[in-house]
Amino acid sequence: SRDVALSALAGTNATIFAYGQTSSGKTFTMRGVTESVVKDIYEHIRKTQERSFVLKVSALEIYNETVVDLLNRDTGPLRLLDDPEKGTIVENLVEEMVESRQHLQHLIGICEAQRQVGETALNDKSSRSHQIIRLTIQSSLREIAGHVQSFMATLNLVDLAGSERACQTNTDGLRFKEGSHINRSLLTLTTVIRKLSSGRKSDHVPYRDSKLTRILQNSLGGNARTAIICTISPALSHVEQTKKTLSFAMSAKEVTNCAKVNLVVSEKLLLKHLQKKVAKLESELRSPESNSSTC
């Protein structure tokens, strides 16, 4: 997962997410991964003197199929919009400029404290929502010619809610409703993975059937490097869920993404490029006139 995370510093989108049942270690694993990723990112930035980096962070949770901003809960439920260039975006999601490693760790701590948790038969502090922490990283490299070449990428750190059936958690009322929404979104994720792993391009991939898969669409068969961590329980009583998690992992291994470096062209470079193109076209337009006058 380290290589996947660090690729975002060189302009390639990246996603790391943990999948598995409640009490199998997803949240603790992702906390450790997140801490390591933050450390590795700032260590890389310190060693890479020829580049300048700008980091921004946003965070959301998907709770009962409602998207909530973990950095500003006062905004209420957020809408998903389709952008022709960026894909699915979350309207009015707060994006904080990161000032330092400590500042980033502080913001991540705020997000984790805001997340929905609840008691179930499997875990007294079960995550009842999907959490996505997103880092947007822009890096600039000064070239010999004096131009500034920039790369832009996003790094998603995703902790999914438990993948067990609602009946396994012995819940009712609110917890049962939460479990039903969790199951529906994870079922859609499983279906998306299965469709992508089949390799049949004619198959319809139901990204839009859940908020989770809409937001992560780029990470599932799209323009990103993705690492999936599957966690399982050693308990014999959870053997069926363990088999399902391993089956999910086997399907996920067959999914092929199309990651590429995302180059950001500055306005000055774009203007210069367009001016050259216009000059070339004007030259080609004048060329037939000069040819006809010499005949």
Image: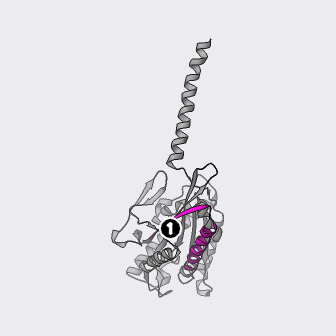
For the point 51% across and 46% down, the residue is: 268
The residue lying toward the viewer, choosing from 231 and 238, is 231
> Residue 58 or 206: which is nearer the viewer?
58
The stretch of residues the image draws in magenta is 31-59
| Residue projecting furthest to the top | 295
Q: Is residue 267 visible?
A: yes
Q: Amino acid at mark 1?
A: Arg
Could you tell me which secondary element the residue under label 1 belongs to?
strand
Please state, as top left, top right, bottom left or bottom right, where the N terminus lies in the image.
bottom right
Judging by the rendered image, the residue that carries numbered circle 1 is 134
Who's the residue at 54% across and 28% down the image?
Answer: 282
Residue 88 lies, with reference to residue 72, above or below; the image says: above
Looking at the image, residue 128 sits to the left or right of residue 147; the answer is left
Residue at the image point whose x is 52% and y is 37% from the top: 275
Can you say whether 263 is above or below 177 in the image? above
Q: Please, is residue 295 above or below residue 11 in the view?
A: above
Residue 232 magenta-highlighted: no
| Residue 151 sits in quarter | bottom right
Q: Position of residue 240 (x, y in %)?
A: 60, 80
Crowding at dot 1, Cα within 10 Å, few <14 / some 14-19 / many 20+, comes out as: some
Q: Is residue 1 visible?
A: no
Percent position (x, y) of residue 91?
39, 61
- Where is residue 283 drawn, in percent x and y? 57, 27
Which of the two residues, 244 or 87, is positioned nearer the viewer here?
87
Q: Nearer the viewer, residue 186 or 17?
A: 17
Query: From the image, which quarter does the C terminus lie in?
Result: top right
